[in-house]
Image (cartoon, grey):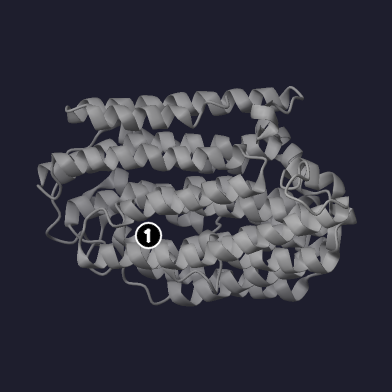
Amino acid sequence: MFLAPVIPLLAALACLLIKDGKAREYVTVAGTAALSASALSAVAAVLAGGIPTALGGILRMDALSSYMLMIISLLSFVTAIYSVEYLRVELAASEIDEDAHRYYYILFNVFVATMAVVPMLDNLALLWIAIEATTLVSALLVGFYRRKASIEAAWKYIMLCTVGITFALLGTFMMYYASTAASGVLSGEAKGALEWSVLNTMASGMNPKTVKLAFILIMVGYGTKAGLAPVHNWLPDAHSEAPTPISALLSGILLNCAFYGIMRFAVLAGKSCGHEFVSQIMTIFGLGSIIIASVFILIQSNAKRLLAYSSIEHMGIISLSFGIGGFFGLYASLMHIMNHAMGKPLMFFVTGRIRNMHHTVETGEVRGLMKSAPFLGVMGFVGLMALTGMPPFSIFISEFFMFRGLADGGHWYIMAAFLGASGIVFYGFLKGFGSMFLGAPSPGGKAVETYLPANAVLAALCFGLLFLGLYMPGGLDRLITMSVGVVGGQF
């Protein structure tokens, strides 16, 4: 299981050497399938009661790690399948050439590898390096089309995230100082001074003032990468300019990788400083993200930018739920990570096919997809309802658990603010996407060759959103509950 990140790296090497485009597609899909199998083996090991380690403890898989790796690998797999159709259409339309096709698949696999290694690392310094590596690789994919707007978006992304993640590095240094001070060893030879599993046992003895400063730096640093307001500025441009499959990975996985780092530090900060401090910081970032995103969603006319601001809103929900704490708040946060990782790629995939059909993603220029492309229209409408938290979809369930946590804590004002912002988001989504799916079809659309496995991916994501809204499998519920136990020590 610890060789999982090596699989996409080998696939990237194969894509570099292979000249045949279809072979590159098969290698990438097979590689992500193997990665998913490896992740599921890690889940099975954890559910059996183990915490596998490797390389002297540098690599470690607890329940939270295996849960995140499962989401990363499965979404990478469905995105690899969808990429086949998306790039074939672009090749046929001469929007990209064979060199760009090869370049995409090489970087795609390297990007997946950098994200897959993030939840495996127990060392917080290596975790920072891995998250920074995701920035460097994904920036190249954001600028894939080499247009002026995409290059500007890539530069904005890499500059803001690199500056932001520098704060995370400072926060990591501060946590190292706190750990060595607590252990009485102020040298670089302090054993386990940056290993999360070791710090977790000694966090209560760390200096609260030092840890508070460290956590604030972490929230600003990793919060920038996670798309939390007010340090979210890179996200709308990057999501809108990247190839649509990459937009799905950025939204569904990359943001969660950064939030994974926040969760690990939140556990340590909670034990050292108390739950109230962590709760206040994460609630402020979470609720602020929801409110800011809801306002910008109202004024978007580009479907991909609308989805980008929706990502900011959903990361806010994840942060707010985590800040609420308690079993229901933490369960809601972790479940919402998975739900968003299904719902947002679904909508990006639908938007990508709309772009291929109409050569635009402007919401005012495409209408009536339910009639002109019934399958696509239905998939998109399901995604719209799911992302806005409508029952019976799974996002409604995770938000319901969040409400339960808010009610248990007596946070009525926060609940009222969230409901108001959610109403604005619902209206903004209906205003933006409603006309695309309903009404009389717009002229100018052309049929494109669809890839049957890509249709299966869209249907599977829709089914997952509906199924998990009606029934939670016992194994998945146990994995999330065990993950709550990992992050809930301070609550």
Q: Is residue 266 left or right of residue 438?
A: right
Of 19 and 327, nearer the camera is 19
Query: Considering the numbered disc 1 on the image, is that residue within a helix, a strand or a loop?
Result: helix
Query: Which residue was labeled with disc 1?
Result: 239
Foreground: 239 or 401?
Answer: 239
- Label 1: few (<14), some or many (≥20) within 10 Å? many
Q: Quick check: can you spot residue 334?
A: yes
Residue under the image location 46 percent in, 49 percent down: 134
- In the visual, does 279 lie left or right of 117? right
- Frontmost residue, 209 versus 274: 209
Residue 429 at x, y percent in the picture = 43, 66
Residue at x 71%, y 63% (from the top left corner): 215
- The residue positioned 56% from the left and 47% from the top of the image is 339
Please, what is the three-letter code of the amino acid marked with disc 1?
Answer: His
Q: Position of residue 6 (x, y in %)?
A: 46, 29
Looking at the image, how many numbered discs can be counted on the residues?
Answer: 1
Q: Identify the image quadrant of the N terminus.
A: top right
Comparing 263 with 71, the one in front is: 263
Q: Which quadrant of the figure contains the C terminus?
A: bottom right
Left or right: 256 as drawn, with respect to 107: right
User: Residue 216 placed where, x, y %?
Assistant: 69, 68
